[in-house]
Amino acid sequence: MYRLNLYRARAGNPEQIELRRFGHAWASRFPAVRYFNQVQGVTLDDLERLSEIDAFYANVASGYKIQVAPDTERPGAFECLADAGFVPRTTSVRMMRERPRPVACAWPDGLSITPARAGEEVEFFQTYLECFGAVRAGWSAAVDNMRLLFGRPEVQCFFARMSGRPAGVGMLYVSGGIANFCAGAVLPPWRGAGLHSALINERLRFAADAGYDLAIGWCEESGASHRNLERAGFTLAYRDPIWSSPAGRCAGSRVGVGTLAGCY
């Protein structure tokens, strides 16, 4: 929500970004970027408002995702979503580490990791977008948004280079004694060489030096990021199935919980 609030505040809100509360849940809508069309922290009671949520996403061609709050009656919520036609596409894991400290970590020859400096923001965010496989046609608009994050004390950007060339990125969002690990990724030529673990370790070093009490992060279950976070001492907080809205949706077609409104 932090990022989207910054982007939405641009003059005229050119991306048509909207945030809305539905009971306990927060819904974000960013029609041009599929990733951000999601509802987080949904409780079983909130699912009684699915028709309102559907209407909120009626103009989003890619549909939306739902993440269920860990402190609700999850089996009932999952059953309700399944009955409504939602499908659990992936499972993320929410990871945590108390009293974060760096760990032993072998660095590849030629690797440097430094805070991104003034004047490097475009190169940094272009590397970010390439790491995550973003379509190049959208890079310019994405960088226009993302550079709003640069230089803010609550957002820390770490730039990995191999022999001086961009190789990967890592970011932290820090608030209230918590270091939130986000956007850690490596360019394809350097994957599997230890750069991702080194980026985790440098962020742990920052969190320790700043006196943060807790580090948290999330990633897809059983992937390389999951393994590297475990090696760095992170433990599982909870598993989080991510449910996708069903295909074949049409605005105004909802009748009860089994038929969903909105277009997909």
Image: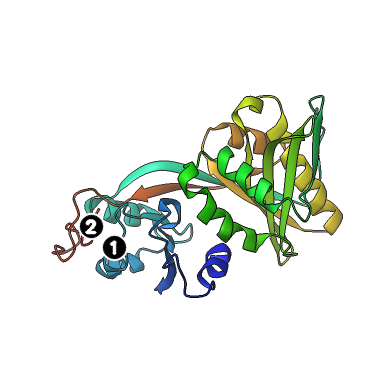
Is residue 50 something that shows in the picture?
A: yes
The label shown at residue 59 is 1
Q: Quadrant of residue 173?
A: bottom right
Q: Earlier in the sequence, mark 2 or mark 1?
A: 1
Name the residue located 51 percent from the left edge and 56 percent from the top edge.
141
Q: Residues within 10 Å of mark 1 (few under 14, many from 20)?
A: some
Is residue 96 something that shows in the picture?
A: no
Under mark 1, the amino acid is Asn
Determine contact: label 2, label 1, CB under 8 Å.
Answer: yes
Where residue 37 appears, as percent x and y from the top left, is 40, 58
Q: Is residue 35 above or below residue 45?
A: above
Q: Is residue 80 above or below residue 162?
A: below
Under mark 2, the amino acid is Cys
Judging from the image, what secondary structure is the residue with disc 1 in?
loop
The label shown at residue 263 is 2
Q: Is residue 40 left or right of residue 148?
A: left
Report the number of discs.
2
Q: Is residue 24 left or right of residue 111?
A: left
The foreground one among 17 and 68 is 17
